[in-house]
Amino acid sequence: MSLMCHVCGNADFGQIDVLWDKLIEEWQLSKYEVDYINRQQGLFCKNCSSNLRSIALAKAIVCSYGQRGTLLQFVETSAAKRLRVLEINAAGTLAPILACLPLHKQVTYPAYDMTKLDIELASFDLIVHSDTLEHIENPRLGLSECRRVLAEEGRCIFTAPIIVDRLTRFRAMLPRSYHGLPAQVCEDHIVHTEFGADIWKYVIQAGFTACIIYCVDYPAGLAVEARA
């Protein structure tokens, strides 16, 4: 199956490896897992520079609203322009595209704590975050806050690193592990949760009524929709 960039529509890709030995050891990754996580984070569109996780997130947003085409095309529609969109931390290459929407708001850590958002009840129709949830000490509470600030029939669409052949593991009793380049780690890069095939459970426990998995490239290109 040929791959298309759901951000811009391009079909020409490059690849770089992004994992380093210490992280591979900390996460106890097999070669198969190393290969698909490198693909998730390191496969990139040569036109817009979106990596595979951003491409999966773009597809999930577009498909969730019953649309076809790219995210660039979707944000030009009247349906998209009516959406009240909350972006929690910049969602990679999607951030400047989402920022074109008139009712878009972006918040970032530490000014906004995902587990206690300073936002009124039912204020948004769509929440987007990308590879943020694994850095939240209590991801279920973070998702519950997303549910609280979503309007009726709202949706939270996000990505997180998912090791598909395992169950979720919390790192509270394990040595600290960080995302980001080894020489540039900081406290908000700490990984609290290694999500597995049961990521849907945290969505439902947070009060959402449905969890949908979108796939552009299994097992590397997955995105999650939590529907209120």
Image: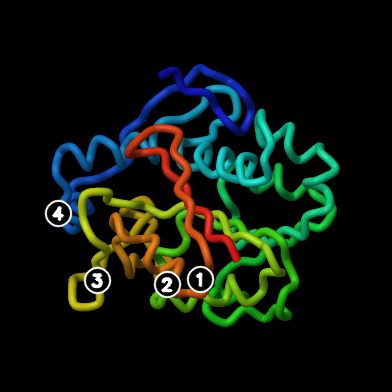
Q: Residue 152 location in percent, x, y?
A: 70, 68
Q: Which one is closest to the eye, mark 2 or mark 4?
A: 2
Q: Residues within 10 Å of mark 1 (few under 14, many from 20)?
A: many
Q: Earlier in the sequence, mark 1 or mark 4?
A: 4
In the image, 33 versus 80, the foreground residue is: 80
Residue denoted by label 2? 139
**Residue bearing the label numbered 1:** 143
Mark 2 is on which residue type? Pro
Quadrant position of the N terminus in the picture:
top left
Task: Give residue 171's mark.
Answer: 3
- Quarter of the rendering containing residue 160: bottom left
Question: What's the distance in space between the residues labelled 2 and 1, CA to CA?
Answer: 6 Å
**Foreground residue among 119 and 23:** 119
Secondary element at image label 4: loop
CA gap, disc 3 to disc 2?
12 Å
- CA separation, marks 3 and 1? 19 Å
Which residue is located at x 48 percent, y 36 percent?
51
Label 1 SS? helix
Q: Which residue is mark 4?
A: 28
User: Is the C-beta separation of discs 2 and 1 under 8 Å?
Assistant: yes
Q: Where residue 140 sits: x, y (%)? A: 43, 74
Taking the image as shown, residue 52 lies to the left or right of residue 124, namely left
Residue 199 in percent (x, y) is at 36, 60
Q: Is residue 103 above or below residue 188?
A: above
